Amino acid sequence: MKNNTLLKTINILLLFVGLTSVSYAQQRPNVIYIYADDLGYGDLSCYGATKLHTPNLDKLAKSGIRFTNAHATSATCTPSRFALMTGKYPWRKTGTGILPGNAALIIPTDKTTLPQVFKRAGYATAIVGKWHLGLGDSVNKNWNGEIKPGPNEVGFDYSFIFPATADRVPTVFLENHRVVASDANDPIAVDYSKKIGNDPTGKEHPELLKLKSSQGHDNTIVNGIGRIGYMSGGYQARWVDEEVSSTFLFKVEQFITDHRQKPFFLYYALTEPHVPRMPATRFKGTSGLGYRGDDILQLDWTIGQLMKTLELNGMTKNTLIIFTSDNGPVLDDGYQDGAVTLLSGHTPWGPMRGGKYSALEAGTRLPFIVSWPAQVKPGVSDALFSQMDILASMAHLLNQKVPNGDAEDSQDHLDVLLGKSKQGRSTLIEQGSTDPTAIIKGDWKYIKPHPGVAYMKDVGIESGNSPSPQLYNLKDDIGEKNNLANTYPDKVKELDQLLQHEIKL
Ligand code: NG6
Ligand code: CA
């Protein structure tokens, strides 16, 4: 009798456990991963900004979980995006640094990627926005024909992208394998080593620029802005910077409305507030902080439009949204756009030191918001989480197995992502501008001695480089002000060995 009751209780418990994991899969939420470009921890009002007001992202954060210790793997774009797509630390593979606009694809086509996890679960998949992971088999590709492999070959059913960054040629959109509005009579050519064609360059004709450069960015002029790299042709295909954001939003809204009946995964890679900051005319001057601030207000408005689209289609409740950024903030990243002179006390790096290109915390610790009204209770989480873990966590959500040897650094932290646990990663390695020099374990952060300047003058950011070891207790000292390396030599030794060990794996 007693045993019977026990068995019954166990059965009920098992049923309950079974039901909760099945119910995730049965609900099959739409998943939208929104990636801002160079947005800092302190750039949103829900993360403490007082000079900028971002009501739509604040609302999203209120409806879900606002993470305070979530990271990109790296302090620049290409490596962070590589890790997001592959679930692998980018510095394990050479050639994953900031790519030029003519680079070949660097994502392997024979390994599990984030979109493939969704595809295997029967989802429709799409990317809209900035790619910056290379296209085609080689640098010398024909921009006027079919360009592949690219996003479609690594798991996206549909892609509408620009190839690299807004400041790199070619300044065109690609829809699946082709440049949008290309013209056989006006072929596009791209070169990163020498000038081609007759378009004026920023170096030769600074008087033609509507946005002056502060460093580099003086090659081909497109839309009054000097770029990195040279291009010729494709006059109908070249974008107008003021329209890039609304073009992406339009494609996103179209994709969502077309997929009311089937669950989808959408990777929405915004370009704001990366340089060249050139918001739509109606946003110019709205923040009082220059075009960088205006770009962030445009970004926030865009999120509001996206939320309206979901609402209109009755999708709000069962859509899982993750909002974050690819690396920390920078003010002067090569154009004189007022980001420095009009900053007015705004602190894009929040309470931290460093920024883009830096191994200090502001390089990779970023805003990270998760909302899924049907499943996720609102709150704040201080769990250590990496964007690289999304792949394994989504595989868990969708009951998909990741083959051995794929996504080797991606850890399943679905419970953390959904707010059921605050036990995140135990360790995380941080990559500054090039090398993986820092490791976090619990409350401790260690930065190994590294050559290179301590202060990057061009961008006005501390790199985290020092000839001496650095040890910080992030719990008491998120601003990395108090180096405790001399006080805790054993901790330094332990973390140094751990860092070397993980790098060699
Ligand atoms: C740098 C560019 C910077 C930006 C960055 C890539 C110069 C002087 N600086 O080399 O403007 O394009 O690359 O940014 O050219 S990222 O967010 O895509 O990593
Ligand atoms: Ca970036």
Image (cartoon, helix red, strand yellow):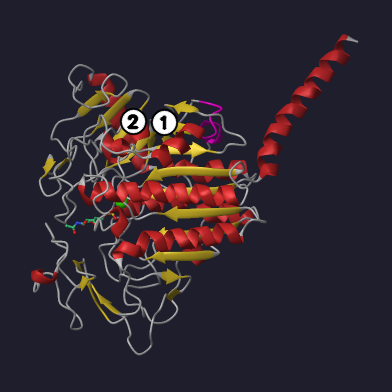
Residue 421 — which label?
none
Q: In this view, does 405 lie above or below 428?
A: below
- Give the quarter of the figure containing the N terminus: top right
The residue carrying mark 2 is 440
In this rendering, does residue 487 appear at all?
A: yes
**Alpha carbons under labels 2 and 1: distance apart:** 9 Å
Magenta-drawn segment: 413-421
Give the residue at the far bottom of this rendering.
185
Asked if residue 503 lies left or right of residue 202, the reply is right
- Secondary structure of residue under mark 2: strand
- From the top left corner, tell me how far across and down residue 273 is, in percent: 29, 51
The type of residue carrying mark 2 is Ile
Q: Position of residue 90 (x, y in %)?
A: 36, 50
Q: Which callout, 2 or 1, points to the residue nearer the camera?
A: 1
Which of the 4 image quadrants contains residue 494? Answer: top left
Q: Do the residues labelled 2 and 1 touch (CB within 8 Å)?
A: yes
**Could you tell me the amino acid type at mark 1?**
Leu
In front here: 329 or 253? 253
Residue 160, image x, y percentages: 45, 65
Question: Among all residues in the image, which is located at the extreme right?
Answer: 1
Q: Is residue 498 above or below residue 119?
A: above
| Residue under numbered circle 1 | 384
- The x and y percentages for residue 158 are 53, 65
Q: Quadrant of the C terminus?
A: top left
Sequence-first disc among 2 and 1: 1
Residue sitting at x 32%, y 47%? 296
The image shows residue 477, relative to residue 152, as above or below, that is above
Classify mark 1: helix, strand or loop. Answer: loop
